[in-house]
Image (cartoon, rainbow, N blue to C red):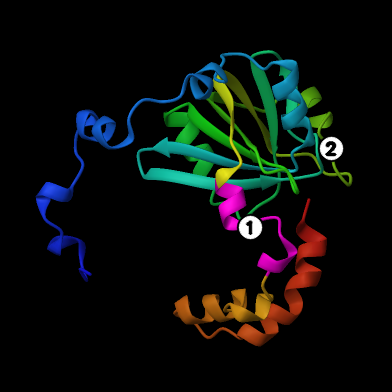
């Protein structure tokens, strides 16, 4: 067992598509047939049941993958080529949005609790602030700051192997939050200023309640 990447021989590093294809072979015909360039009725059903989507983008500062979540149906299918995603209140890093104003390419991964298949979209996104559109996404009296309008280039479902292997939806796979460092502990360790981790953790549930939308 090597201890660092530097110890791995160059002969074991894959750097060409020919090397990849020699290892993995050809894709199965069905895995290719499921990829289309529009939102079919079947794929729409998955999107409308998903309460969570991971959003991947690329920009001058690098790559980003951010979570988005709301009640099922929060990602709205506008037509066969377009989905709309409200951008809810967050930490104002706006990494996703900074990327998109420079590079419109976007990739989405939808997850549905209890469902082992996932749904993937690759496309291009615009950031929209149309008042009427924002109003249509109101939650708890609060408007999103903007809407991501994603034009679908490719859409397909991913088979269940990854979620089966991970046991993601299994109750037996769940762990207690206390097994990991608290958010307050992490922030205290990374902060250069005096920071009360216990006080932060104690007050966070109320902070979440007040700022979730």
Q: x, y (%) of residue 27?
A: 41, 25
The numbered mark, 2 or 1, whose residue comes first in the sequence reads: 2
Q: x, y (%) of residue 94?
A: 55, 46
Q: Residue at x 51, y 46 (%)?
A: 65
Q: x, y (%) of residue 57?
A: 47, 37
* In this picture, residue 164 sits left or right of residue 5: right
Please give the count of numbered marks on the rendered protein.
2
Is 164 magenta? The answer is yes
In the rendered image of this protein, does residue 128 appear above or below residue 5? above
Is 205 magenta? The answer is no
Q: Residues within 10 Å of mark 2 (few under 14, many from 20)?
A: some
Range covered by the magenta-colored residues: 162-174
Q: Extreme left residue here?
A: 10
In the rendered image of this protein, does residue 67 appear above or below residue 40? below
Tell me the SS state at disc 1: loop
Q: Residue at x 61, y 78 (%)?
A: 182
**Residue under numbered circle 2:** 138
Q: Which mark is residue 167?
A: 1
């Amino acid at each position: 067992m090597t201890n660092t990447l530097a110890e791995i021989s160059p002969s074991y590093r894959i750097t060409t598509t020919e090397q990849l294809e020699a290892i993995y072979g050809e894709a199965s015909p069905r895995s290719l047939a499921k990829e289309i360039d529009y939102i079919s009725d079947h794929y729409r059903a998955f999107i409308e049941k998903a309460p969570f989507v991971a959003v991947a983008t690329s920009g001058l500062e690098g790559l980003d993958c951010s979570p988005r979540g709301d009640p099922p149906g929060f990602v709205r299918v506008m037509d066969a080529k377009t989905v709309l995603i409200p951008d809810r209140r967050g930490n104002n890093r706006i990494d996703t949005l900074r990327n998109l104003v420079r590079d419109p390419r976007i990739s989405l991964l939808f997850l549905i609790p209890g469902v082992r298949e996932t749904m993937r979209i690759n496309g291009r996104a615009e950031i929209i602030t149309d008042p009427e559109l924002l109003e249509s996404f109101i939650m708890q009296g609060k408007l999103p700051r903007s809407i991501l309008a994603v034009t679908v280039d490719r859409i397909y479902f991913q088979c269940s192997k990854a979620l089966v292997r991970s046991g993601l939806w299994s109750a037996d796979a769940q762990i207690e939050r206390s097994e990991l460092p608290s958010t307050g502990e992490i922030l205290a360790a990374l902060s250069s200023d005096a920071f009360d981790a216990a006080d932060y953790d104690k007050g966070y549930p109320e902070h979440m309640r007040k700022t979730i939308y």
